Amino acid sequence: MGTSADTIGPYLNLIPYVGPYLKSLMDYIETIMDYVTLALSYVIPLHDAAIQALMLSQYAVHGPGNLVALANRKFVMDEVAKRNDPNVQVDLVPLSDDFSGFTERYTSQQERVRMGQVVSDGRDAFLKSRNWDFGLVLNILGCKVSVSPGVLKKRGSTELIDLTEGWKSMDTLSLHSFGIKIKWNGIKCTHSEYPVIGYGTAFSADNLNDSNYDYAGSRSTNPSASNRADSSNGIANGFDPAPYSIGGGAIPAFHELSASALKQDDPRTTITIRVTQSSNTQSYSGGNSIIKPGGRLALYQGQHVGGKSAAISRAEVYFERPDGANPLFSGKAEKGSLFSPYWQVRLTSVRPFERAMAQSLQGGIALP
């Protein structure tokens, strides 16, 4: 908008009476846009800070090798058990917990491409294309012929460079003239991009390699305007150099299901715990009760194996949409991913080897 106002302004003086007023209006718009883009540049570090905070919060929950998540989970289970009965002890049944390999942290550029593709595909229509044309074109003798003075072509988009490294926007506006040139050897169709009207770029980081990006046809349709947009004169106020940020607009490191879990059709993770309590803290005849069996009932002492009672339980975390499938994709079932929130938890049957392991820990049986 700023460069368009600057380009159009001098020509407005040619309009009788109202020309000078229109020129003043264009100068005002150009000044306003400089302030607007400068204000927008101050938002970039704030937006980046939010992204970094989300990344750090995810890392804080998981920790290196999921150690923090494992420790926090055990802490929560202990807390719940103690609030119900301060004398109980919670233990994980060996070989029953597979969460440590269920998720992992993706850090390299190649690993972050998948998240970048999700972000790029999720752009709204305004970010994908800001294109419009204005003007009348006729088809004469097989050639496009524009009605004077020509056709305005606006092109622009915002792209995520290499899907991970940062973002850049480009917008251009040019006047195109289409016509016919009759020569001795036939008819030739002509096309010219006249001195560009408007152009501009903004980006999250300096020196982004965007040579392979067309910006919704800007470089192919308005090449002259795109060249000016790429020059120092085309950079929006506040974006030269790029606004300071830690991540530079790049896709940050993130946690997601591990590579092995993503290959599963129905990824799940389970955990089996054992809750125990010492016999001498329990009020029953074989424990600390003052009432003891006598007479014929004395045949049964009520002693627990290993001097404690135990209970085991297995929980399963699984992925399931509330509607059972994804209606936006022809009813196909959506696979589990940390990109989606539809994770559920439920109790499930304890497996025989887990039961045998728990009994072994109590001294009830010996594993082969």
Image (tube, rainbow, N blue to C red):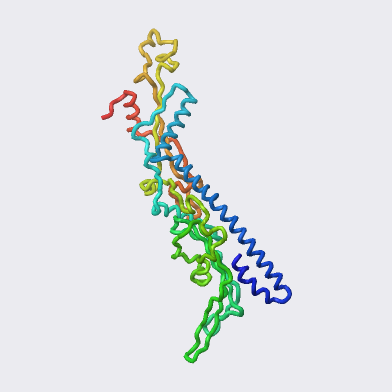
Q: Describe residue 306's horizontal placement relative to residue 178 as left or right.
A: left
Residue 341 screen position, x and y as percent: 49, 45
Left or right for 310, reference 83: left
Q: Nearer the viewer, residue 54 or 76?
A: 54
Q: Residue furthest right?
A: 17
Residue 175, horizontal then vertical, whole percent = 57, 74
Q: Position of residue 299 (x, y in %)?
A: 35, 12
99 above or below 264? Answer: above
The residue depicted at 40 percent of the width and 19 percent of the height is 278
- Tell me what residue is drawn at x 46 percent, y 40 percent: 60
Image quadrant occupied by the C terminus: top left
In this view, the residue farthest toward the top is 295
- For the question of whether residue 278 can be seen, the reply is yes
Question: Picture quarter containing residue 290?
Answer: top left
**Number of callouts in the render?**
0
Image position, residue 151 (x, y; %): 58, 75
In front: 289, or 213?
213
Residue depicted at x 60% and y 75%: 135
Quarter-of-image position of residue 147: bottom right
Residue occupying image coordinates x 64% and y 61%: 32
Residue furthest to the bottom = 184
Q: Is residue 190 left or right of residue 22?
A: left
Identity of the residue furthest to the left in this view: 368
Q: Name above or below for residue 218 compared with residue 363.
A: below
Is residue 1 among the parts visible in the rendering? no
* Quadrant showing the N terminus: bottom right
